[in-house]
Image (cartoon, coloured by chain):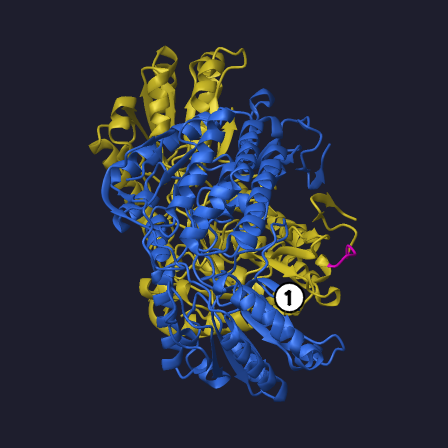
Chain colours: A blue, B yellow
Amino acid sequence: MQPVLIAGKWRAADAAGSFQAANPQTGATLPDVYPTSAWTDCDAALTAAAAAFQTLRTLPRTKIAGFLRDFAARIEANVEPLAAMANAETGYPVKPRLAEVELPRTTNQLRAAAAACEEESWTRPTIDTKLDIRARYEALGPVAVFGPNNFPFAFGSCSGGDFAAAIAAGCPVIAKANTSHPGTTRLFAELAQLSADAAGLPTGMVQLIYRTSHTDGERLVSDPRLAAIAYTGSRSAGLKLKAAADAVGKPIYVELSSVNPLVILPGALKERGEKLVDEFLTSALMGTGQFCTNPGLVVLLAGAECETFLAAVGKRYEAAPVGALLSKSVAESLARGVDVLEQAGAKVLAGGKPSDAAGFRHSNTLLRATAKQFIAAPHVLQTECFGNASLAVVCESVDELLGVLKSLEGNLTGCVYSDTAGSDDATYDKIVPALRERVGRLLNDKMPTGVAVSAAMNHGGPFPATGHPGFTAVGIPTAIDRFAMWACYDNVREARLPEALKNKNPTGKLWRSIDGRWTQE
Amino acid sequence: MQPVLIAGKWRAADAAGSFQAANPQTGATLPDVYPTSAWTDCDAALTAAAAAFQTLRTLPRTKIAGFLRDFAARIEANVEPLAAMANAETGYPVKPRLAEVELPRTTNQLRAAAAACEEESWTRPTIDTKLDIRARYEALGPVAVFGPNNFPFAFGSCSGGDFAAAIAAGCPVIAKANTSHPGTTRLFAELAQLSADAAGLPTGMVQLIYRTSHTDGERLVSDPRLAAIAYTGSRSAGLKLKAAADAVGKPIYVELSSVNPLVILPGALKERGEKLVDEFLTSALMGTGQFCTNPGLVVLLAGAECETFLAAVGKRYEAAPVGALLSKSVAESLARGVDVLEQAGAKVLAGGKPSDAAGFRHSNTLLRATAKQFIAAPHVLQTECFGNASLAVVCESVDELLGVLKSLEGNLTGCVYSDTAGSDDATYDKIVPALRERVGRLLNDKMPTGVAVSAAMNHGGPFPATGHPGFTAVGIPTAIDRFAMWACYDNVREARLPEALKNKNPTGKLWRSIDGRWTQE
């Protein structure tokens, strides 16, 4: 049985059970056995994290930045074992996906977090010189990160965006491995612990638990020693954790589900229909459709172009190789989702059935419904089919299209393709306000699957995309904000103020808002 | 029966019941009768607010700013009726409190909100020129404001901080009057509606309902037409609304309770003991102690200075006039709170009993407990006694003092008084980290009852002070953030971008973060 990482030591778990991951390509169970931890493990991790936080607050930020950079370097030195393990656990190809795309993204993100941590402008130091009141964002305390199944590196609970943001804020992390890739998470935790030791960070800065009971998970997130939670995963489990954290007024950031509406207007189809088939196909089947921002809902206006587009996509779906899904439960859930859409009246244009090939697979699936059907049962027809399935909704008029958009729940992204000549512009203007308020990121003429790590990125959106539309899970430094409290100093003596709030700018590079003006002075 | 304000019209409520306010100075019931609205009123208000929001998004910000300024001017032109009504409903003196302190604060706040609304820098426009990704905060949608009993003007649901912040964000407000001052809220709503009409804002921009059943309140906050909620009031009612909003992933900002720990170190008592008695008395009895930031918990180190201080405060408490409390239920709740503290072992040094005088009153009450008692039953001894009662906790050592601070729940404020010669400095350094993470605002040598409307202010803090430690309810522009979503534009064509995100700075005054640099260019 693999050990857990608690208080700086790899030690045997107090195991209440065990589990093994499976290889999605073959369906075969993988050899390593991982513990389901009893509460005592959570309890020990919480105590260590709380102690680590107290030490951490006394350390210079450069130490934390040094840790993040050292960790990034160790990851780069271990591309091969990391990619091999992740390939076995997720079925994603070693190249290009794991080694050449997701890994560099992960290390870039860690280095961007290191820079933000060191530079500290994310804390938005704000000084009112007249009243001698000063404030900034400060680290909140230990954070539990529940990573998703679909980004074993870039969103891994011990390597990804939430991890990097929490550490950069100055918060110790208790990583809860995603149970479909425990080995990958373990390798990251091993490297992180080496980096933490090298950087002189307190034990308990990074800890790893693989799995707990649902009850212990809820107890963990509501424990007073924990300050905040980041969760990306299934809606049902996420809502249970959210309820537990909300009940004790603890910030919990959940990313739950999103169908990412994609509107393709007729002018765009006329102008560049074939190109759009390519773009859509690449985006929708990338990673077997297992992106949070996968375009699961395509909204079109009825007409010849629409029929041509759907026929072409359907043909290409049938011809495209059927990728592996991340786990048996993803495959089962996808089959259930497709079934729900069919029951609600959607028609299968391509695929529609689980695949008979080895491993966890479902045929590339395209469904079709009318706008009237969608508007009559919007919640059912918005069922997220996580994986390689999309629903096309065909509207008889712009009003119907608007009706479809108005019946959407909150989503991470919303995208509109229009022509360059301007024939779609009036429709664009009519429909975009409804889309804008329902999505975190509005795109033009671009598929939503690329999520750049930019200060202006939003990987967030209204419920149920996330639990609070004011925050983003991707983007440095904005993602860091989630793990901070607004900390005000009123009439506090100059010598006792944090350096960042003293009269003199500590580095000459720190951006501060002084009497309403942003300045580095 | 007084009418409600729905969709721009004063009209008869669909009343499920009625209520009247009382004069706290005398206990006499006031003549005006107010409706408890049935769900149909809430439903109509929600529909009107949702429609208003859609119109509002198309209007220039200057219109909203104009509304706020016009409203401020109308308030100033109506000082007398407003102060007379509030005096009858709250017992606060017309002068200086209502007319000379709270009213100017309210109009200043509305004007500061107008300036922030117009200037728009609160939206933090962020532009990544390399990737052509842009983002800013945008109005979230209709907001319900449940104002508290203790600031009929400056935190009134139709005039105060939450109202001003929500409007400045661009959100219509459904005001739920505090039932202890419905008439004051009505007068504000009348003026606001005149201003909304004058400014050409959509009907439904400002609406007023006086009271609903608990069930309808929970239904209101979880309704999809509502985007966010601001609530200041009792912990029990607030937690019910919070649970209802949280369950549907809707942002709700609650301010629930705070005992505002005040540590007075021995050097400070030696140096300026008498002055501190004065300062404490003024702060603790101001407004009959009915400030959210009232110093309800005084933590002292045992010794002669401590005894002198407590004896002096006790004597002054007995001698001070007994102010009126805001309502019968405040008086009852205060008596219950004092009883809870006594049951837990606290000893009464002054007062301790409801007052026999006319109206709603409780004797000025000072209690005393040991640090050992406090640490043994921290939750019980942190029972908020909203009103003119404070608990002194006497510690035998600095370690005990630290133990008291570590057993605190989240608070709005925490304050440390120390001497100027430096004899308290070592103790300060030892205890402040524990206090810092438990309070939103840390003060030195200053009572917490003044809450300046400053960009650096924090009127917030960890639970149960509020529901999220990252936000403040007072402070322009920071308080506005609560009513906004992070809205990203990815590859959106220049002509379709909001002015604030186009390449050219629309005003030359808007602060934007472009590629990591704050600039007005």
Secondary structure beneath dot 1 equals loop
Q: Position of residue A482 (x, y in %)?
A: 50, 45
Side of B63 relative to A134 (left or right): right
Q: Position of residue A301 (x, y in %)?
A: 59, 83
Q: Is residue A437 visible?
A: no
Up-down relation of residue B473 to residue A420 (above or below): above
Up-down relation of residue A20 to residue A496 (above or below): below
* Residue bearing the label numbered 1: A446
> B190 or A126, which lies in front?
A126
Side of B408 relative to A457 (left or right): left
Side of B30 relative to A460 (left or right): left
Q: Is residue A363 visible?
A: yes
Chain letter for the residue marked with disc 1 in the picture: A
Q: Which residues are magenta?
A: B502-506
> B509 or A55, which lies in front?
A55
The amino acid marked with disc number 1 is Lys
- In this view, the residue farthest toward the left is B343
Q: Residue at x 46, y 26 (%)?
A: A197
Residue B8: in magenta span: no
Q: Residues within 10 Å of mark 1 (few under 14, many from 20)?
A: some
> Which quadrant of the structure image shows residue A489?
top right
